[in-house]
Amino acid sequence: MPAPRLQLTDITKRYPGVTANEAVSLTVQPGEIHAVLGENGAGKSTLMKIIYGAVQADEGSIAVDGQPVRVETPQQARALGIAMVFQHFSLFDTLTVAENVWLGLDRSHSLAQVKAMIREKASVYGLPLDPERAVHTLGVGERQRVEIIRALLTNPRLLILDEPTSVLTPQAVQGLFEVLRRLAAEGCSILYISHKLHEIRALCTACTVLRGGRVSGECNPQQESNASLSRMMIGAEPPALRKQPSAPGKQVLEVYGLSLPSQHQFGTELQGVSFEVRAGEVVGIAGVSGNGQHELLAALDGEDVRAAPGMVRLHGQDISRWGPRRRRTAGMHVVPEERLGRGAVPMLGLAHNLLLTRREAVAPGGWIRMGRLREQAQGIIERFGVKASGVDVPARALSGGNLQKYIVGREIDAGPQLLILSQPTWGVDVGAQAQIHAEILALRDAGCAVLVVSEELDELFALSDRLLVLARGRLSPSIPASEATVEQLGAWMSGLWDVSPLDAAAEVQA
């Protein structure tokens, strides 16, 4: 038998006040697609960073291909054939895609060669990407594509993927799975982190489950059910989501013929976007990242105020030229797609991050009532089950899923009249996902208008009363969620809502 591609033995990592990993052992064989499951804060990200050399273990040992190694830097990890796609991206905003990828490669390639390599890999793997485009112009899903292409260009022997399918249509997910299976057949080992249990069961042949920083189980996920995997992860099955029929009321958000040229060379122009969201309903917008989601959200939340008068209305009032603070005062709250940088200031504590969108703790004259602020933050932590050592812990210290729970909780707790959410449960475990979904539906049932922009079709079907698709800056017709199918929406993601279903299916296959 060949030596294991990766063998971790009794890996332990402690931080002040918390043990992230405790005596974790994990073995990955050559050519194996191995899942790592766990709820938010279970220690998955820390363990992956230890493998990749971004974090040093306090105790334990690592062996690669049977040889003991000490991986102290990502450069050493890459020299060993280890590549990683992080959940929180490590990209320079002011550089182009090609320049970011070039930084992660050896200097044997010129920048022109790297651009050609990116185009080739993007074509082979079905991940459209322009190497000339500046990273700051990319949406979250597009940035994830950069990370995936950068990792693949290193020709890794061990590839670590963290939530890699959120940028793809349902049809393209199957294509990526075929690529990963081909890589595995060629001997590449894959560590695959995802909260989509059906993906784990379809793709992976081995699984290690973490709970509270320790290994709580090992299994072949293809022999398990979603319920049994959930029990291994969180000790129980997530509560079933109960969505009652909606009772829409008056129009809250109205968008009429919203057309906006892109603000930069590589953006997406919005073309005649029109839709409405009523009180007491959830409207979902599907689509692959980079098709105008960023531009639409900027026009809705007040970041972009170039819309012509009358194009965006809230409660019948023209808000097209209003800024973000005035829109929040009128009852609109927004959960942005990017957690760190837009949803939270990384260096600030959780309590102070409330001040980005909440002003209840600010007294006349601008004085901050710190007692009230900390009380609010603690209430959100407890209500949404955020794992944090206190209200003053910096946002960047939380796992991605726990920070997402806090940001979503911050906006729901505000009692909005209109709530706009972009990727509301990206990177959130199944238990927390069920809780967030339940809170969104409770808000809807209380009369709030909710707009959800997501690349997760399962999420949109679970939450939405009506569905639309955004493709190439154009918006599809509205369809009741009960009448939509995954195949139909997948075709619409290619902009094929103006052709017959048979022609659309043929186009997607082609």
Image (cartoon, helix red, strand yellow):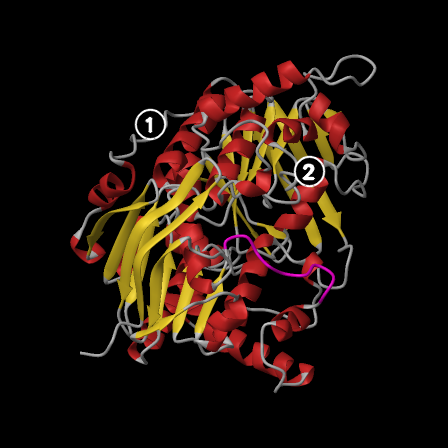
Q: Is residue 199 above or below residue 348?
A: below
Main secondary structure type of the part rendered in magenta = loop
**How many numbered marks are there?**
2
Q: Which amino acid does label 1 sit on?
A: Arg
Q: How crowded is mark 2: few (under 14 residues within 10 Å), some or many (20 or more)?
A: many
Q: Residue at x 53, y 74 (%)?
A: 122
x, y percentage for residue 255?
67, 37
- Residue most toward the right? 365
Q: Is mark 1 on a helix, strand or loop?
A: loop
Q: Say which label, 2 or 1, has the lower sequence index.
A: 1
Q: In this view, does 273 lie to the left or right of 447?
A: right
- The quadrant the C terminus occupies is bottom left
Q: Is residue 452 visible?
A: yes
Give the residues in magenta.
Answer: 87-95
Q: Kindly check if marks 2 and 1 are in contact, taking CB atoms under 8 A apart as contact.
A: no
Residue 92 falls within the magenta-colored stretch: yes
Q: In this view, does 474 lie to the left or right of 249?
A: right
Residue underneath mark 2: 300
Residue closer to the observer: 331 or 107: 107
Disc number for residue 242: 1
Q: In this view, does 358 lie above or below 146?
A: above
Residue 482, quarter of the rendered image: top left
- The quadrant the N terminus occupies is bottom left
